[in-house]
Image (cartoon, rainbow, N blue to C red):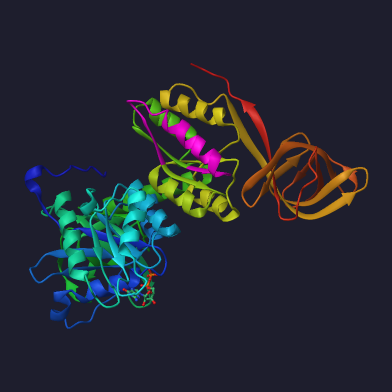
């Protein structure tokens, strides 16, 4: 039903770039987006009244146009990507010239790189006496963003978003970067695009902003969008003006959805309402099935399959470890595994518990998450479930490299897989003379069985792995305790347990090799 014929080269015409602003909190993303919006000449023609629809376009004096996504930061960018939507052509990375490169600056670079989107740097707040743009440049150079004047290929502008200094120069650099990308789209065909934002409006029903990426969207067009469908009743641009036709790279607010679509959903114009409805219903059914099957969207096993079929050329990895030393050792040995056919790509390497940001980055980039002696935080655990991202755990280096090596060869599945059985939270500690320390636990998920292996997790880091010495409920020795119940656990050879620790039980299973 959804056949897509890519446009021929003759159909393609230049289109404006779509830009997302990223950077550390308080470095001036919002101020910059406001300053840029004020340079728009079309806004003056429209009477200066602008609407917030999630994206806006800016027209320069000479008629050149740029589109900006109005939600700054890498969270929105990456959650869109996790839904399969790549709308951004260029990232403007804002770095405050006084603070310099911070944690979220690094994250933003990782997210943009993983998406293979070029970065133009805006060194902001140069009006401040403490501003030190040269220091920012050398910090960025260390992260691989080398300024042009130092022989690299990253465009950088010094600006003051607040005082509106350097804004035009920045936009010139963005347009220069866009020129190099030779952005093109077909205009004369049914529209395709992405949902940028959506809301339920009291008077108007479901309303969503669509970024048109190809073709021309017209009033009256029938469409499918994610799990829903509809007909374009009316369209409004970012000045609130009603429009009849919308061309590539232009955002527009659309009325006429049956139900509310989600940011990141696709938007495809079709020739019949019957077809649109059928596709939406089919997609709803598929989504329900995937939900009930709880099938992982990304798992090492899935990637094994893809590698085997030659579908995958890069193995993306988000790597977290407990210490800097291990992290460096792991990075070195993983990178060495790259072959001519498959490249190992470590898109993030960091220390500490696996975070929500790690999960989102993995989900967006089809990456596996590997925790070396570290586990996800409870929020990250929930998010991984929702995003259906599999998290692999290792505590022996050669086992990790062995598994990856096998995956790369596209040959063997892992020989031993770990099955997580249950999770309990330590709520109280009892010191019992001659016996040892007993942890009063509440079982949160699955089961705790006396025969399972157990791992003690503190702030995401695995502090001990061993066996259960005794499992009790009300002074009775028991074999197993299920979720929702409390129990007392003593761990063999480990008395350093603390309140708030998590106990994870697991079994190791040997997988038969069928070749
Ligand atoms: P965001 O969190 O990155 O969106 O940052 P904001 O745009 O909200 O800016 C954070 C703070 O920095 C605000 O108080 C701004 O007024 C201030 N700020 C932004 N740009 C500049 C600038 O160019 N110069 C100075 N001095 N302050 C700025």
Q: Among all residues in the image, which is located at the extreme bottom?
A: 47
Q: Is residue 362 left or right of residue 54?
A: right
Q: Is residue 453 left or right of residue 510?
A: right
Q: Among all residues in the image, which is located at the extreme right?
A: 434
Decide which of 494, 255 is in the foreground and name it: 494
Decide which of 488, 485 is in the foreground and name it: 488
Q: Quadrant of residue 468?
A: top right
Question: What residue range appears in magenta?
Answer: 319-346
Quarter of the displayed picture in which ligand 1 can be seen: bottom left
**Residue at image location 37% in from the left, 71% down from the top:** 130
Q: Quadrant of residue 210?
A: bottom left
Residue 318 sits above or below residue 13 on the image: above
| Residue 205 seen in the current view | no
Image spot of residue 346 (x, y percent): 42, 40
Q: Is residue 15 left or right of residue 420?
A: left
Image spot of residue 507 (x, y percent): 67, 33
**Residue at image location 19% in from the left, 58% down from the top:** 17
Q: Is residue 114 left or right of residue 19?
A: right
Image spot of residue 403 (x, y percent): 51, 28
**Residue at image location 62% in from the left, 35% down from the top:** 419
Q: Quadrant of residue 418?
A: top right
Image spot of residue 328 (x, y percent): 49, 39
| Residue 502 seen in the current view | yes
User: Magenta stretch: residue 114 in it?
Assistant: no
């Amino acid at each position: 039903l959804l056949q897509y014929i890519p446009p021929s080269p003759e159909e393609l015409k230049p289109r404006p770039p779509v830009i997302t602003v990223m950077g550390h909190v308080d470095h001036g993303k919002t101020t910059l987006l406001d300053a840029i919006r004020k340079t728009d000449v079309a806004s003056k023609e429209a009477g200066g009244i602008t609407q917030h629809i999630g994206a806006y376009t800016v027209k320069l004096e000479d008629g050149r146009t740029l589109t900006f996504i109005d939600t700054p930061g890498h969270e929105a960018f990456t959650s869109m990507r996790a839904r399969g939507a790549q709308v951004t052509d260029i990232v403007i990375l804002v770095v405050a010239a006084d603070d310099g490169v911070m944690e979220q600056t690094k994250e933003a670079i990782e997210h943009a790189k993983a998406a293979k989107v070029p970065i133009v740097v805006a060194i902001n707040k140069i009006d401040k006496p403490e501003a030190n743009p040269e220091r920012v440049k050398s910090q960025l150079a260390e992260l691989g963003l080398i300024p042009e004047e130092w022989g690299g290929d990253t465009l950088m502008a010094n600006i003051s978003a607040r005082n509106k200094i350097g804004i035009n120069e920045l936009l010139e650099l963005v347009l220069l970067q866009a020129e190099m990308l030779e952005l093109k789209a077909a205009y004369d065909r049914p529209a395709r695009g992405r949902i940028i934002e959506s809301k339920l409006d009291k008077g108007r029903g479901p309303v969503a902003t669509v970024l048109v990426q190809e073709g021309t969207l017209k009033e009256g067009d029938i469409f499918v969008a994610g799990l829903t469908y509809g007909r374009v009743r009316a369209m409004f641009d970012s000045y609130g003006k009603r429009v009849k036709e919308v061309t590539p790279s232009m955002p527009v607010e659309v009325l006429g959805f049956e139900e509310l679509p989600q940011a990141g959903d696709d938007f495809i114009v079709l020739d019949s309402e019957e077809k649109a409805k059928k596709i939406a219903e089919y997609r709803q059914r598929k989504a329900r099935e995937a939900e009930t099957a709880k099938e992982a969207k990304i798992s090492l096993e899935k990637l094994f399959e893809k590698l085997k079929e030659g579908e995958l050329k890069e193995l993306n990895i988000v790597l977290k470890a407990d210490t800097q030393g291990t992290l460096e050792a792991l990075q070195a040995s993983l990178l060495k595994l790259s072959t001519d056919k498959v490249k190992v790509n470590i898109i993030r390497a960091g220390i500490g518990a696996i975070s929500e940001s790690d999960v989102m980055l993995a989900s967006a980039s089809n990456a596996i998450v590997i925790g070396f002696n570290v586990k996800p935080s409870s929020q990250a655990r929930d998010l991984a479930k929702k995003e259906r991202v599999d998290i692999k755990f290792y505590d022996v280096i050669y086992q990790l490299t062995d598994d990856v090596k096998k995956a790369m060869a596209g040959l063997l599945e892992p020989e031993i897989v770990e099955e997580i059985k249950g999770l309990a939270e330590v709520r109280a500690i009892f010191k019992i003379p001659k016996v040892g320390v007993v942890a009063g636990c509440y079982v949160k998920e699955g089961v705790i069985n006396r025969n399972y292996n157990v791992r003690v997790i503190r702030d995401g880091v695995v502090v001990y792995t061993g066996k259960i010495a005794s499992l009790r409920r009300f002074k009775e020795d028991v074999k197993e305790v299920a979720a929702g119940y409390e129990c007392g656990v003593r761990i063999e050879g480990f008395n350093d347990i603390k309140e708030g620790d998590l106990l994870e039980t697991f079994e190791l299973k040997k997988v038969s090799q069928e070749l």
